[in-house]
Image (tube, helix red, strand yellow):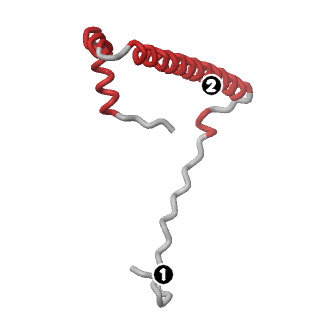
Amino acid sequence: MKQDFPEDKEVLAKLVRNKNVIRAQLRRLTISDIEKFLEVAEEVHVEKQVEEEQKAEEEVKRQERLAELKQIMAEHGITPDELKTEAKPKRGRPRKKAENGETAS
């Protein structure tokens, strides 16, 4: 599960908006550290691209399935309203019983 650190995200967002700030921060690092940073940044970049491509493919598949269902429904004369069911009323939590066996109020 991914952890989201809003304060870090804000700092990074501010950092990437300003090229001069990035340059100043990178100048403080050694060449080795910059190379490590670039490797990690490239890995994250590739991961994000793959994630976005997967999401796009899933959405295309979802839209195709919806179109198929709509076609089947139309062929059989079924309307979306016919598929809706009334929600069953939720039952409340049962009352707790007191030690003597009577229901507590």
Instruction: Give left or right: position of 104 versus 66.
Output: left
Mark 2, secondary structure of its residue: helix
Q: On the image, which quarter does residue 79 sit in?
A: top right
Q: Which one is nearer the viewer's eye here, 30 or 3? A: 30
Q: Position of residue 60 (x, y in %)?
A: 61, 19
Instruction: Give left or right: position of 76 versus 101.
Output: right
Q: On the image, which quarter does residue 30 sit in?
A: top left
- Report the residue at 48% width, 65% height from top: 92
- Report the residue at 54% width, 17% height from top: 46
Mark 1, secondary structure of its residue: loop
The amino acid sitting under disc 1 is Lys
- The image's mark for residue 97 is 1
The amino acid sitting under disc 2 is Arg
For the C terminus, give its image quadrant.
bottom left
Q: Position of residue 20 (x, y in %)?
A: 25, 9
- The image's mark for residue 62 is 2
- Report the residue at 65% width, 22% height from top: 61
Q: Position of residue 74 (x, y in %)?
A: 69, 25
Query: Is label 1 in contact with label 2 (beta carbons under 8 Å)?
Result: no
